[in-house]
Image (tube, rainbow, N blue to C red):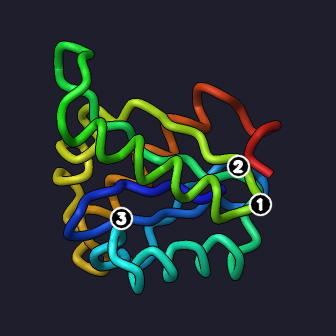
């Protein structure tokens, strides 16, 4: 599995282990909506041989869509057309604030947020969908 914390400046990335137990942040992709950035994300899906992508959906605290929600939905739809694996959207509220509590300077806060997102998805959906 690959989780993506989409943002126009950076896209945080995290992958799960084969058992769907652990989520590990990896290097973020800069400017993922650009041609070059988008190609890097598509290549990441292929090289990591993931079977599913989870894109964080930044809904407002009220649960309503925001301009960022619309942008993330559009970008995820574009990604779904470019890769041969399912692309799911998953509520990412609070992932960045949880990730900011981690002091791991080896990975970006965006990728730590993607790891939190992936952990939440795995906890909700279970390992049977992780592979």
3D distance between C-alphas at marks 3 and 1: 21 Å
3D distance between C-alphas at marks 1 and 2: 20 Å
Q: What residue appears at the point 75 percent right and 55 percent down from the top-left corner?
A: 85
- Would residue 122 appear left or right of 4 to someone viewing this image? right
Image mark count? 3
Q: Secondary structure at mark 1?
A: loop
Choose mark 2 or mark 3, whichever is in front: 3
Q: Height in image: 124 above or below 21?
A: above
Q: Height in image: 94 above or below 34?
A: above
Q: Secondary structure at mark 3?
A: strand
Q: What residue appears at the point 34 percent right and 56 percent down from the top-left corner?
A: 6
- Where's residue 28, x and y in %? 36, 75
Q: What residue appears at the point 35 percent right and 46 percent down from the top-left corner?
A: 72
Rate crowding at label 2 as few (under 14), some (14 to 19) or many (20 or more) other CA atoms within 10 Å: many
Q: Are marks 2 and 3 in contact (CB under 8 Å)?
A: no
Q: Earlier in the sequence, mark 3 or mark 1?
A: 3
Q: Are marks 1 and 2 in contact (CB under 8 Å)?
A: no
Q: Earlier in the sequence, mark 1 or mark 2?
A: 2
Choose mark 3 or mark 1, whichever is in front: 1
Q: Which residue is mark 1?
A: 84
Rate crowding at label 1 as few (under 14), some (14 to 19) or many (20 or more) other CA atoms within 10 Å: some
Q: Quadrant of the N terminus?
A: bottom right
Q: Height in image: 55 above or below 8?
A: above
Q: Which residue is mark 3?
A: 12
Choose mark 1 or mark 2, whichever is in front: 1
3D distance between C-alphas at marks 2 and 3: 19 Å
Q: Which residue is mark 2?
A: 20
- Where's residue 97, x and y in %? 17, 43
- Would residue 37 appear left or right of 94 to someone viewing this image? right
Q: Secondary structure at mark 2?
A: loop
- Where's residue 105, x and y in %? 22, 76
């Amino acid at each position: 599995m690959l989780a993506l914390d989409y943002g126009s400046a950076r896209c945080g990335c995290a992958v799960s282990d084969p058992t769907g137990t652990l989520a590990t942040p990896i290097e973020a992709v800069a400017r993922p909506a650009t041609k070059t950035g988008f190609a890097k994300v598509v290549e990441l899906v292929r090289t990591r041989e993931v079977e599913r992508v989870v894109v964080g959906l930044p809904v407002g605290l009220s649960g309503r869509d925001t301009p960022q929600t619309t942008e993330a939905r559009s970008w995820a739809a574009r990604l779904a057309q470019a890769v041969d694996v399912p692309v799911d959207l998953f509520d990412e509220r609070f992932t960045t604030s949880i990730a900011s509590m981690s002091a791991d300077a080896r990975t970006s806060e965006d990728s730590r947020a993607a790891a939190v997102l992936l952990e939440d998805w795995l906890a909700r959906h279970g390992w049977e969908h992780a592979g």
